Image (cartoon, rainbow, N blue to C red):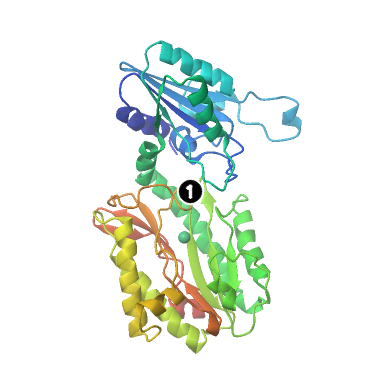
Amino acid sequence: MERNIYKKRRDALFKQLPKDSVAIIPSLSGNPENQPYDASFYYLTGLMLNNAILVMTKEKSVEKETIYRMKIDPVLSLWVCSPPPDDELRAKSGIKDLKDFSLDALLDTLYNEAAKGMKDFYLHYTPKKPNLPSSLSQALVEKIRRYLPHINLIWLSPIIYELRRVKTPQEVTLFKEAIRITKNAIVNVFSRRSIYQNECQVYADYSASLINELNRKSGFNVIVAAGKNATILHYDNNNSPIHNNSMVLIDAGCDYEGYNSDITRCFPRGKLFPAKAKHIYEAVLTAQELIIKSIKPGVSLQEINDNAKDIIFRVYKDARIVKTLDELSKVYYHGASHYLGLEVHDVGIRSRLLKPGCVLTVEPGCYVEKLGIGIRIEDDILVTSSGYENLSFSIPKKIKEIEAL
Ligand SMILES: [Mn+2]
């Protein structure tokens, strides 16, 4: 990626901030989701840093950017990989002003900015979920409210999320790399399928392909589910036997420079699809292709999802898999689409209209426990000015293509 793209993103954010305001974007460890860095911080700086805070101030029309980062600890460096040196941080982010990280130093800065007459303080944080402990960002919110009760604290994240929702061509290039790696890993699994006795072997082969690409990882727990395990949406034990006539579902991705692919494919352990699985598979594939065709700018992700349910019902009914909507809810029980990006279930408001540059998944499924068959087919789709581009079109999904491997 060329260096100035992060500067461009910050400029886009600056544009949305009023005069005399401060934006604070922390990337703090100890977040309950256990992410190694904050995706929005990375989006704005290009730095996969933890325990760092980006502060952007707009005083009248003078814009200032500072990163608070951990200083390299020479003793700790003997044990763990150090963060990059300062000149590298400056070169990558385009931000010259670096300061030592400490929450107290940050509070001090905010205090001084408020004293200077800065009016609005925009803070990026993920709202606390009731069942999870506070993250450091949420603790920071509480600290600011307690020590600086006079400042006007505004939730910044929705503004960044809207910027992140629309991807640039450079970002699309990174998705394509993530998908290329995923494709190679899945095609390899397809071609070796007859030797698999257990889900763990599929998982090992998939992971090995990613490790061979500079030790990349899936952005989420890879699901390898044989037979009726595939009817459990988030099954990830990946250690059950694969029987002779079973279908196997693999839902896997790859994180490439922060950008995620999210692909699901299903394959028979044997050479050919068993008849019952074939019938269900064809229906899911037909529905998936119809849903993909409904993607274009000007409709919302919410509408795509609502529309998808109608399409799925119509197709499954024609295929005599279900008769009523009530029956549909027993074989299909999840959303058909989500945004994709720096997070697998990426940020962005679902009721907003799609624009060229939005990236989303399309993943209808059909799960028939009594037959021991769970089918889901998932591709990654880019919204374009004329409609859509299926970024993962080259990962085989037609029955004949898979059987031929
Ligand atoms: Mn998905």
Kind of residue indicated by mark 1? Glu
Looking at the picture, how far across and down is residue 291, in whole percent?
Answer: 33, 67
Residue 86, by quadrant, is top right
| Count of number-bearing discs | 1
- Where in the figure is residue 368, as x and y percent of width and height? 50, 80
Instruction: Specify the quadrant of the image occupied by residue 307.
Output: bottom left
Residue sticking out furthest to the bottom? 275
- Of the 4 image quadrants, the one containing the N terminus is top left
- Residue 139: x %, y % from top left: 55, 32
Residue 51 vs 275, above or below: the answer is above
Residue at 60% in and 56% down? 210
x then y, percent, for residue 274: 52, 87
Q: Dot 1 corresponds to which residue?
A: 343
Outermost residue to the top: 116
Asked if residue 252 is positioned above or below residue 398 in the image, the reply reads above
Residue situated in front as seen by the camera: 245 or 237: 237
